[in-house]
Image (cartoon, coloured by chain):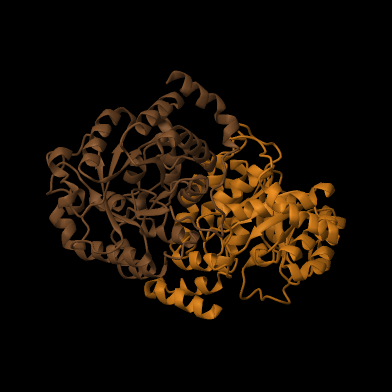
Chain colours: A orange, B brown
Amino acid sequence: MSSKKNDIALSNENKLETLEKVGTMLTFRPDIKVVDCTIRDGGLVNKSMFEDDFVRAVYKGLEASGVDYMEVGYKTSKKILSTAEYGTWKFCDEEDIRRIVGDNDAKIKISVMADAERTDYHEDILPKSQSVIDLIRVATYVNQIPTALDMIKDAHDKGYETTINLMAASTVGENELIEAITILAESEVDIIYVVDSFGSLYTENIRALMYKYLAITKPNHKQIGIHAHNNQQLAFANTIEALTLGANYLDSSIYGLGRGAGNCNTELLLGFLKNPKYHVRPLLQCITENFLPFMKNHSWGFDIPYMLTGQLNRHPQPAIKAMKTPDNIDFTEFYDSLIEDVD
Amino acid sequence: MSSKKNDIALSNENKLETLEKVGTMLTFRPDIKVVDCTIRDGGLVNKSMFEDDFVRAVYKGLEASGVDYMEVGYKTSKKILSTAEYGTWKFCDEEDIRRIVGDNDAKIKISVMADAERTDYHEDILPKSQSVIDLIRVATYVNQIPTALDMIKDAHDKGYETTINLMAASTVGENELIEAITILAESEVDIIYVVDSFGSLYTENIRALMYKYLAITKPNHKQIGIHAHNNQQLAFANTIEALTLGANYLDSSIYGLGRGAGNCNTELLLGFLKNPKYHVRPLLQCITENFLPFMKNHSWGFDIPYMLTGQLNRHPQPAIKAMKTPDNIDFTEFYDSLIEDVD
């Protein structure tokens, strides 16, 4: 392990430049999967309190647009969060999902996210034969990996496809990150995600991470995913950079709906991909009919406070709080408060 | 000429991958110049009708932030556009600029843009010794290059620094573009700009253009600039990609203010550059005090119609028109109208 780790750390600088591009702009890669997480990540904007009609419109729109997966929400323990305080899509009971998708006879697959240490996975995740869910995505910080691995094994043994989303990669030291990816590569997981939780990564950071994830996981034949945030207006750019280097699970959300600065827009991503199975038009209809009204009561997307937490590699929480009273915001004061926190 | 053209066209594909990176994330390049065009490109949002206080706040903010150039507006012929219909900053008379910057004893330099065929350059551009302007930027479509070259010669002979901004590069055929850059490289101009007028270029297109501009202009020792639009949320990403490959004149605007989807945000760009002469904080104050009030009556920035014209490599004009009545907009109808226009 330690010699492997050193090899990778030492050769990183050189090999970065020799990563081969996968495909060109005029080809399409059939291995690409778009994972729309509008309802899941967007649930961080409204405590997952989406109306059924909204979720159904997203399902219909994504299905018509050819998107591969729809992530419908979180599988959170009801012992940890209250159903009085959070909406249906924070818990994703089987009957709630079926109320929207029936038996999901469509091509689109259904995904849920399960946070490490916040999910009663033994009880709340049914055997695949009893569920309309296809993909279980385990979100974990580096220190929660032992729990995450048990969750992955549980979901895998129950018959699901699985991903592991290693959050806040930008805050993990180089050696620790290499060790973490090495351990994840040896697990049952199908897909390992590069996650830019704070929206702090520049494109060259994405390249460096992609090299690490690809180099370490190659012997285990894992696939790589990318989940980007838009704090520095780089969510789309970083997603297509990762894609060009070999990532094939691409997270996005309609109109960028997601926590804080939001995510890579699904409609931007479909516009870039050359696979004729994808269509932007159904998403435009979904946005016009559902998202424009939704925006009147909820806000997300790039703004200065999110940019500042991104530039400083900080969790967006203080920016989200500041943006709750946009009429009184003073960006200079907000910047000063962030800098003071660091000292 | 024709053999040179063929060499470049043929070797383009191979050499693209061997472009050397200039600097790393932890170094700064003293050759970098940030050209803020808030008032100039932003003038396309309000017919250049900025109040003096607004322009003065931008000047003070940019000066304090260490930005290298402030573009204060256009030098448009008053025979072509009426001073009754357009504001001061569409014409930039010497006394108007001096009302804001005095003799400009600050370090920041002053720029104006002169559109080919829309400027009485012989009369309206004074000898440098009589003007507070430092840089004349000539904007030209490829078919206007003969006029643009005469404008460059005039400005150069009068003592100014000069750039040429070859607009709508995404619509010019490969051979024509190579010929155009070759001609520009042989002129008196100091800096040649890669301009993504329609916000339609992906990062790999920027790489391909950067290769062409650098390879062709190298014998003539020209510097390369980048002017990006944010139709696909790639203005910042494309700007730092061009910078990494060797561009050193970087256009941006405060809070992205500019036509349609706007430009690369100056505050994002300064956050990326590692030169200690740049400071984000004065821009945050300028945004809070001036741009947030301005936004109540003017709109710009990424939205679906701009994305669609960008994806289709079209001028943003129909999107700007559609966004004038945002409460009635139907993105699907707008998309259909664009597609019909193409047929």
Residue at point 86%, 60% (across, down): A1
Question: The C terminus of chain A lies in which quarter of the figure?
Answer: bottom right
Q: Position of residue B44 (x, y in %)?
A: 28, 49
In depth, the one of A306 and A34 nearer the eye is: A306
Visible in this render: residue A133? no
Q: Is residue A187 left or right of residue B146?
A: right
The residue most toward the top is B2
- Looking at the image, is B124 positioned above or below residue A130? above
Q: Is residue B113 left or right of residue B265?
A: left
In depth, the one of A159 and B128 nearer the eye is: B128
Residue at point 52%, 65% (across, down): A311
Visible in this render: residue A320? yes
Q: Position of residue B159 (x, y in %)?
A: 23, 45
Q: Position of residue B179 (x, y in %)?
A: 40, 26
- The tally of labels here is 0
Q: Is residue A187 left or right of residue A102?
A: right
The quadrant where residue B312 appears: top left
Q: Position of residue B152 (x, y in %)?
A: 26, 37
